[in-house]
Every structure is written in C-alpha cells, then in structure tokens.
Image (cartoon, helix red, strand yellow):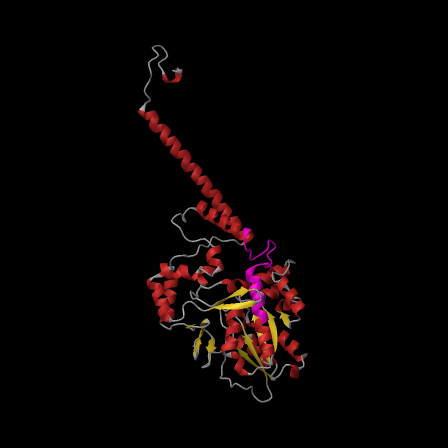
C-alpha cells in the first residue's frame, strides 16, 4: 500500500522531494553532538561516582596486571636481582632481611635480625628473653632502631632481652615459618606473635601485586590452604632469582599461573584498553564489588572482618598453629594485636573494631593476647595522631607500646613459661 506524506512531497505538484544535502549533514552533526554530549554527561556522572566511592567508601579504582608486570615492578624486580635492597629474596619465605645491613636507620645484624648486636642461642645470664615475630609493626617501619618498641622496652626494663624477628610485608604464615625455620632455636621464654588484622588479606595472596597494585614488594610468597582442620602448604612459586628472570622474559605465562591460588587475582579486575573511560572504570568497580558481595566477602558492610570468609578462618588457623607450636616448644606465646591508623580512627569515632570477631575467638580459645588498641583509651585524639608517622607507629607511639607491655610482663609469673 502506498502511503502519501505531505512532508516529503511538493505541496502543489505532489512530486517527491529529494532531501537537501545540507540538511542531511546538519542532521548528522546534530546527532553526533547529542551523542558526544551524552557521552560527556555519562563520563561526568562516572567521575562523580568514582569520587564518591573513594571518599565515602574508601573504594578506589585499582586494576591489577593479570597477564604482565607493570613497568614499576619490572624496575623493582631488577633491583632485587642486583641485591640492592635491604629486603632480599628467600626461597621458603618469599623474602627476608639482608644480613649485616645499615640503611635508612634500619640496622640488621649478621644474623638477619633487626638489632645493633648479635645474639647467642641462649639468653644472657639473668635476662628474660622475648622473641617477637610479625610484619612491619613488629619490625617497626618508619623509625630507627633505638625508636622501636622492642629497644625501648629493653630500656624500660633492663631484665628483658628482646629479639626483633619482624620482617616488613609478612603475614602470620611467613612469621610462623620464620619461627619454625630459624627463631625457635633462640630459646625464648616468651614469644610475641605480632598480628596486624589487616594482614588477613595477605594469607590468601601469592603474588603481592595482586593484592596491592602499587606495592614496593613485587615478590611471591608461600600460602596455606585449608582442608577441614588441617593446613596444606603451597610453596613459594618463585624459589630462585632465575625464576624472577624468567618471569621478566615471559610474564604472560608466569603471572597467570601464580593467580591460580590467589584470592585477589580472581576477585580483582585487570587493565584493559578502555581504562581511559571513567564509565568503564566505574562499571568494573561496581561489578567487582558485586562479585565480592555475592561470593566470599572479606569484609562485612560495617567494616568488620567477615568471620565466615576463607581469609578469616585461614588466619585463625595459622594463629592457632603458631600459638600451639610455641607452647609445645616450652615457651609462653602472647598474641600482640597491632591496630592500623584507620582502625584507631574508627575506634575514636565509636565504630566497632574491625577485628572484633578475632577477639571473641581468642577469648573462647583462652589465648593470651594483648590488644594494643587499649593504649588509646586514655589518649586524646591529638595525642593519638602523634602515635603514628605515616602508617606505622612513631617513636612516641612505640614508647607507649613498650610501657604498656612492660606493665603486662611485670604481672606475669616468668617461671611458668620458661624452658
């Protein structure tokens, strides 16, 4: 059926009119302008959305490299290959401290322990020896040797001898292995198990850049898998420096292989050719958050560690094994809980502790533990802020920790845990 439209025909003759080329071009320009305007509007909305997520939820756009290594991490790995850092590769632990090093105020003795002197396996006569294992809060990043809480605790109580076995970047898994492989032979009466609850995320990680894309430790580590009530060790995938050289040459093959047992590799999004678009970024962030909420959530909505997650239960299992091993060796274990700067801010704002469920489990298990958040009970917010430098405790903060620990130790029967 023929349909007549007066818009397309001459009003007198009825002859079909051909569209004007200028009008066609004008229409195309108009549609193109509308599309550009629509895209700009969506991009502006996405920029605002990313800003709100960053400022209100602490959610950042942080893509990981899933099939390659960033240029930053390539440069850092080459530094490690040159042995030009105070952190060095270790085939069992992933990394450790370079023996006999003095750099940036960090004095490492010939035994690979942070300290100004060497230590015999037996404590000095008349001294109560304490060994401390853990991460950067035990090592005491950002301060000099005489500003660590270990050194200041010795100064406050001359009866004590403290050995600092902390290593920056460690999880409980690596700290436990350092104790088993090296630390237990130092015959300590007490063993402090340093635990920063944020390290919960490290225990389901194999290659640090999957967890922290901007990390200064682009190194691999061992991790444990849980099988019912037992732990199975997955050894460090990059056992030698040659393994790192091969990764630099063939990262597309090596990097994905390390992601097989890494929670963060599966949970996080990678780089793509569309990353310049803020809309694409926002979409990736929303999808990743939806996946986390629908799957094995690490955190609950109120910012508390999820007690049903694999990471939480694996962390708890590691702490149990570490604690019980120290007991079996005849020493007294004490878990030291180091709050992060963010956790202290939450505490001062009256919000629940992110690690409340850990505290409940420790109490149920009748573990001896010290929650160092307690040092902020009597400190005003202005004083609390001075307890940190950037993200670790300052010299003043470490002095407060040492004072708190000294008071605790003085109320313990030293003979009960000695061997």
> If the image is split into quadrants, where does the N terminus sit?
top left
Say if the magenta span includes residue 301: yes
How many marks overall?
A: 0
Q: Using the image as rendered, state which of residue 261 and residue 384 is in the foreground.
A: 261
Residue 129 percent location from the top left of the image = 58, 82
> If the image is split into quadrants, where does the C terminus sit?
bottom right
Question: Can the viewer see residue 397 in this picture?
Answer: no
Q: Is residue 360 left or right of residue 117?
A: right
- Identity of the residue furthest to the top in this view: 12
The residue that appears at 46% across and 58% down in the rendered structure is: 265
Say if the magenta span includes residue 328: no
The residue that appears at 56% across and 83% down in the rendered structure is: 187
The residue that appears at 37% across and 68% down in the rendered structure is: 243
Residue 408 percent location from the top left of the image = 65, 76
Question: Can the viewer see residue 244 in this picture?
Answer: yes
Q: Using the image as rendered, state which of residue 18 and residue 270 is in the foreground.
A: 270
Residue 75 percent location from the top left of the image = 36, 64
Q: Using the image as rendered, state which of residue 10 and residue 223 is in the foreground.
A: 223
Q: Is residue 11 left or right of residue 57?
A: left
What is the quadrant of residue 158 in the picture? bottom right
What is the quadrant of residue 320 in the picture? bottom right
> What residue span does the magenta drawing correspond to?
294-320
- Asked if residue 101 is positioned above or below residue 66 in the image, the reply reads below
- Identity of the residue furthest to the bottom in this view: 125
Residue 57 percent location from the top left of the image = 55, 52
């Amino acid at each position: 059926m023929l349909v007549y439209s007066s818009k397309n025909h001459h009003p007198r003759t009825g002859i079909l009119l051909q569209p004007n080329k200028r009008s066609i071009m004008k229409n195309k320009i108009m549609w193109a302008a509308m599309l550009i305007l629509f895209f700009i509007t969506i991009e502006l909305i996405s920029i605002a959305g990313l800003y709100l997520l960053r400022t209100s939820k602490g959610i950042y756009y942080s893509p990981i490299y899933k099939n390659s290594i960033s240029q930053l991490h390539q440069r850092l790995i080459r530094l490690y290959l040159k042995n030009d850092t105070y952190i060095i590769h270790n085939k069992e632990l992933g990394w450790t401290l370079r023996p006999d090093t003095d750099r940036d105020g960090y004095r490492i003795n010939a035994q690979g322990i942070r300290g100004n002197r060497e230590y015999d396996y037996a404590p000095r006569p008349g001294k109560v020896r304490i060994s401390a294992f853990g991460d950067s809060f035990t090592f005491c990043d950002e301060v000099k040797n005489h500003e660590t809480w270990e050194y200041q605790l010795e100064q406050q109580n001359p009866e004590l001898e403290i050995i600092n076995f902390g290593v920056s970047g460690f999880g409980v898994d690596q700290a436990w292995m350092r104790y088993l492989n090296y630390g237990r032979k130092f015959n300590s009466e007490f063993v402090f198990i340093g635990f920063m609850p944020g390290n919960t995320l490290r225990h389901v990680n194999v290659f640090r850049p999957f967890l922290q894309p901007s990390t200064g430790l682009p190194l691999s580590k061992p991790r444990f898998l849980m099988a019912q009530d037992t732990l199975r060790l997955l050894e460090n995938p990059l056992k030698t420096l040659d393994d790192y050289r091969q990764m630099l040459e063939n990262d597309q093959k090596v990097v994905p292989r390390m992601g097989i047992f890494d929670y963060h590799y599966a949970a996080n999004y990678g780089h793509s050719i569309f990353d310049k678009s803020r809309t694409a970024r926002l979409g990736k962030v929303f999808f990743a958050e939806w996946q986390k909420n629908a799957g094995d959530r690490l955190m609950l909505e109120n910012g508390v560690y999820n007690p049903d997650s694999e990471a939480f239960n694996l962390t708890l299992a590691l702490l149990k094994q570490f604690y019980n091993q120290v007991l079996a060796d005849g020493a007294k274990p004490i878990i030291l809980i180091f709050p992060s700067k963010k956790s202290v801010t939450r505490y001062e704002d009256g919000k629940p502790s992110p690690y409340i469920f850990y505290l409940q489990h420790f109490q149920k298990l009748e573990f001896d533990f010290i929650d160092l958040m307690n040092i902020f009970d009597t400190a005003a917010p202005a004083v609390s802020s001075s307890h940190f430098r950037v993200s670790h405790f300052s010299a003043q903060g470490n002095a407060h920790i040492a004072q708190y620990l000294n008071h605790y130790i003085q109320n313990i029967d030293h003979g009960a845990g000695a061997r």
